[in-house]
Amino acid sequence: MPNALVLEKKQQQVAALTEKLSAAITGVIVDYKGITVADDTALRKELRENGVDYFVVKNTILRRAIAGTELEEMSSVLEGTTAIALCNDDYTAAARILGKFAESHENFKVKSGFLDGKVVDVATIDSLAKLPSKEVLLATVCSAFQAPIAAFARAVQAIVDKEDGSAE
């Protein structure tokens, strides 16, 4: 039987993880076994640079943190080695980075994930991984809005140039 100090520490871990999960808009759970320290370090660096919180978690701690929530159905994948990536502001960052990493590392596998507090399947995470980053999507939308305006400006300029040419 664990002593009171150990039990209190684990309860604090569960409470902290529950808070992180509720603040995150997206999360991806992975099986990280078989990757090298160098690969893990590079992965963590890339995730950190993109605002993703990535850490290894004990299955029992995560299971207790999601108990009684809509994420509880992820309990079925909590076996073996488990790490979780959480993001509070970008829906695609964690899935995109971890999906790309999983493609190049045979033993690294995506187990499950969630979006806005709802559990999603691995196929949905794979679809998210294929989406471009938020910045690329915004640039695409801006260029789509800008194209008709630019064409209009060129047409107006052509009329002005034509009138200037005929006045001479």
Image: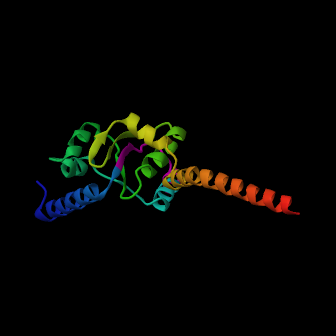
Left or right for 163, reference 25:
right
Q: Residue at x 44, y 49 (%)?
A: 92
Q: Residue at x 23, y 52 (%)?
A: 61
Q: How is the image coloured?
A: rainbow
Where does the magenta region start and end?
Answer: 27-41
The relative height of residue 94 versus residue 163 in the rendered view (above or below) is above
Looking at this rendering, what residue extends furthest in the bottom direction? 5
Percent x, y of residue 1: 10, 53
Q: Nearer the viewer, residue 45 or 157?
A: 157
Q: Nearer the viewer, residue 58 or 166?
A: 166
Looking at this rendering, what residue extends furthest in the front direction? 167
Percent x, y of residue 59: 26, 46
The relative height of residue 3 versus residue 79 in the rendered view (above or below) is below
Q: Name the quadrant of the C terminus.
A: bottom right
Residue 109 in sight: no
The relative height of residue 130 versus residue 140 in the rendered view (above or below) is above
Residue 33 within the segment the image draws in magenta: yes
Q: Residue at x 12, y 61 (%)?
A: 3
Residue 43 within the segment the image draws in magenta: no
Q: Residue at x 50, y 59 (%)?
A: 45
Left or right for 34, reference 66:
right
Looking at this rendering, what residue extends furthest in the top direction? 123
